[in-house]
Image: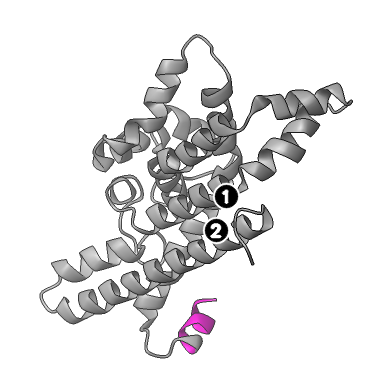
Amino acid sequence: MIDSLSYLSPSLSPAESRALFLSVKVAFWCTLMGVLPALGIAWLLARRDFWGKSLLEALVYLPMILPPVVLGYLLLVLFGRNGFIGQWLQHFDVQLAFHWTGAVLASWLMSLPLFVQPIRLALQNVDIRLEQAAQTLGASPIRAFLTITLPLCYPAILMGAVLSFGRSLGEFGATITFVGNIDGETRTLPLAIYSAIQSPDGETLALRLVILSVIVALLTLWASQWLARRSQTRLGYRDV
């Protein structure tokens, strides 16, 4: 995959291709695996009152104000080889610390607030009487949610996914603390830029990586705007 990426982008060096490919892979899996948890958490916060709701809300939004290094250290303590959860996962041959899958976990936790908030606001703005009307016509609560509420929340889910993807592309502090800076394994674009800056003759490489990061970010924003316009058109919010 890396060789084909280098062929498609002949101006990229192997190190740059590895960093780009790993960044996109981590962001992709972070976004894909975060959809259902973000939707479930947003639904709980928007539609249910329960004991501990304030605590759950605080934990969800904590990464927005917590230094990323703190979160990375906590992940290392819990999921490292000597951590409580990490020791248990080793029985199943699952490794997160110093592995790219750990970068996915760190990126997901850092981007969770940006994923949950748009969906939560959308759920709060959907008139629950629409679901109740569907249920009076024979639809189950799950069917009413899937066929009425979920399509109305589609633009918010899309926005949350894009924000999560973009946040994952730029994640640095929690990632380098939890999974390190291993070339070909955990060195994403932000970590590659950091490594280049630390090298005596790495200014040129750092500049190339910065330009590459800006291009990827712009393409992500352009894709999000395009998808948002299509979703608004499908829902009838704007003309074709």
Residue at 33%, 75% in the rendered image: 212
**Element at badge 1?**
helix
The disc at residue 228 is 2
What is the spatial separation of the Cα atoms under label 2 and label 1, in whole angstroms? 6 Å
Q: Quadrant of the N terminus?
A: bottom right
Is 31 within the magenta? no
Q: Quadrant of residue 68?
A: top left
Extreme residue in the front direction? 239
Q: Residue at x 51, y 24 (%)?
A: 45
**Label disc, if present, on residue 190 of the rendered structure:** none
Image location of residue 118, percent across then percent down: 48, 41
User: As shown in the figure, which amino acid type bears the numbered disc 2?
Assistant: Ala
Q: Secondary structure at mark 2?
A: helix
* Mark 2 closeness class: few <14, some 14–19, many ≥20 residues within 10 Å: some
Front one among 86 and 111? 111
- Of 146 and 83, nearer the camera is 146
* x and y percentages locating residue 114 in the rendered image: 42, 43
Above or below for 112 versus 207: above
Q: Nearer the viewer, residue 57 or 15?
A: 57
Q: From this viewpoint, is residue 91 visible?
A: no
Residue 33 at least partly seen: yes
The residue type indicated by label 1 comes to Pro
Q: Are marks 2 and 1 in contact (CB under 8 Å)?
A: yes
> Would residue 181 be found to the left or right of residue 55 on screen?
left
Q: Residue 117 location in percent, x, y? A: 45, 37
- Is the image coloured rainbow, by chain, by secondary structure, or in one colour? one colour
Residue occupying the far top of the picture: 51
The residue that disc 1 covers is 155
* Residue 126 placement (x, y as % from top left): 61, 33
Q: Magenta stretch?
A: 1-7
Sooner in the amino-acid sequence: mark 2 or mark 1: 1
